[in-house]
Image (tube, rainbow, N blue to C red):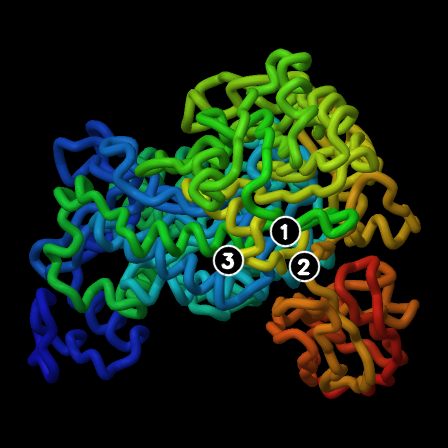
Amino acid sequence: MLGLVATPVFGLIKGPWSNVNDDPDTRAKMLVGNMTLEEKLVMLHGPMSGPCCSCNTSATCAYVGNVLANTRLDIPPLTMNDGPQGFRDNVHPGSTTSWPSGLTMAASWDVEAMMEWGTGMGKEFFAKGANVQLGPGLCLARVPRNGRNFEYLSGEDPFLGYTLVQPVITGIQSQKVVANAKHYVMNNEETNRGFISAEVDERTRFEMYYPAFAGAVEADVGSIMCSYNKINGVYSCENPDTLAKDLKTTIGFKGFVMSDWGATHSTSIMEGLDIEMPTAKFMNPDDIKAKIANGTATEAAVTDSVTRILRALFAVGTMDVPTSSWSWKKQGTNCTTDASVTSARKLSAASTVLLKNDGAILPLSKGKKIALIGFAGVGAVVHGGGSGSVVPSYTVSPMEGIADQDSGATIKFDDGTNLESAKAAAKDADYAIVFVGTLSHEGGDRASLSLDDGCVADGRHGSNTQCEGNANNQNAMVEAIAGVNKNTIVVMSIPGAVLLPWNKQVAAILTNFMPGQQAGNAIADVLYGVVNPSAKLPITLPNKENETELSPRQWPGYPDPANPAHADYSEKLNVGYRYYDTYSIDFTTGYPFGHGLSYTTFGYSTLTADSKSVSFTLTNTGGVQGAEVVQLYLGYPKEAGEPPKVLRGFQKVSLEQGAKQSVTISLTPKDLSIWDVSSSSWKQIDGTFSVFVGSSNRDIRLQGTFDNKPTF
């Protein structure tokens, strides 16, 4: 069965598939052609018996997900591990870097930062012997209270997710680790996630919920994870419309689909599922062979699934390193390095959003009296819970970071539990910095958007110290401190949208979302101006609870909100800022999508626009070097049925004081298209488009129009 090898590589059994000059499709087809049916079937599931995951006793259970190796052909095991913001090691906690979360990184709006983040995580997975990273997370923040919003790098906009996911995939897979985009698809709430059906029309799926996954496919992502929920009454992992048709055929995904853990309900190989995780309840050899025998499955489908798996392994280089690279015993490696924590610090600072800065109170002057109130010590909030958590190798608290940054400062700390004590600490300080936060986790949605309602000590947050202190009275704490110190600065560590009822009472507000283990050093870098903030909100911060007026039928669902069976996506395209624009909602205490300030200012001028590109001049009109994320929104002709304006481009531009630069954002035909249900394809819109260029969705500096004549 074995052929001659043209170019040998390390560790791979010699055969024609060993030629590294061949493309991954060719290599995978040649290798699978030398496999028996029994060998193919082994690759379609986790362990048949015994423990399945996160052990330190054998290769069958070492990682969160395990597929056995083929020793005859030297196909390595599939060693899959959480998660979307770093290697979650349940066996050797504290041996990896707790990176900023996906939503945190989305706030950077920076493709270079996303590449660095993906590469850094991929290196640690390789060092731990894991060749599949179960991340990044891509779902849209449709529901502000969704417990997993902190994991997802799309924020509330599909174009943002489409753009940012591509460098992340490239970065992870550059380390010979297969990335896994999740959770496909419409997994937008945790309430009854295992049974609820997302009722979504075709246009909404393609325009809102597929684009981030399509971006991953364009980056040649090796794997995608199907989710727990149903779509239009059919479970995601057995849904032929969303898997076989939409994902594999229409979008053109070439990799393999794995189930979320325990998300299988049938032997679904013909519907588009390739691997069942973590065990083999349905995708086991006996069931698949029985289906082949009775004609309800085909061996060709098995071959296709295995080819997809092998193609992914060839495409990223997993097959072209010694098979010892994927030894389960490497899981014990401590892979946190000086370089990784330096990168985590840089990325966290780059993702910190300056929301308010009255009187240019920031950056701070050194050598002052500072009161640190709230979660500034060991109770600092740094990450969410569930499979998106990582036990840090160590954590730098805000108090430690600020003390290290400003050795001349006089610092008083009070956790805020006793408001009179906290007020006394803040009253005579030059600056009062109040650290607030809230947690979230998979398996449940948040009880509300209030800071007072999110620090639940339920063991699912990955740390029993986070949120220790005045967790249930944070809004009153901020108001009390602001009442005695006019120089009150609030830093929010949050997993998604929160309410800011005290906005008008404080001088400055920042959010670092879920900042990771370098939280303290990173926020100190921003507070003192070592890093000039340039991040932008990837979500809307609302003025009030349920400002987008999701009905119980929309979320959490009906007929029983406590145990919903269906969730109506009847808002269609009006998610997040699109709803705010459609219904002309102004901001009083909240902030719009794309908002974020700098320690300098920027001027926009000389707009030109046509259907191919939009150009303008950006000038740093302030006093220091800084970077601006310029944003391009388009308004479609009315007959297209789109919201008033949608994000279609952005670019981070760094300028010295007084410098100017011509900026051009290219447009593609798809940017000028809507999903046409009648043809099941993208259709360009003929007519006059409005152009909006600015610093946020609501801070539009330049406007214009152009006419479009379809080219396809």
- Indicate whether 485 appears above or below 678: above
Q: Amino acid at mark 2?
A: Tyr
Q: Amino acid at mark 1?
A: Pro
User: What is the spatial separation of the Cα atoms under label 1 and label 3, in whole angstroms?
Assistant: 53 Å
Asked if residue 554 shows in the view, the reply is no
Horizontal side of residue 543 vs 451, given as left or right: right
Q: Position of residue 25 (x, y in %)?
A: 32, 74
Q: Residue at x 31, y 52 (%)?
A: 132
Residue position marked by numbered label 3 in the rendering: 244
Residue 669 pos. (x, y %): 70, 80
| Residue 223 picture quarter | bottom left
Q: Residues within 10 Å of mark 3 (few under 14, many from 20)?
A: many
Query: Which is in the foreground here, disc 3 or disc 2?
Result: 2
**Are the residues at dot 2 and dot 1 in contact (C-beta closer than 8 Å)?**
yes
What residue is at 48 percent from the left and 27 percent from the top?
Answer: 377
Q: Quadrant of the C terminus?
A: bottom right
Going from N to C along the chain, the mark reached first, 1 or 3, is 3
Alpha carbons under labels 3 and 2: distance apart: 49 Å
Left or right: 411 in relation to 336? right
Q: Which residue is mark 2?
A: 599
User: Which label sits on residue 363?
Assistant: 1
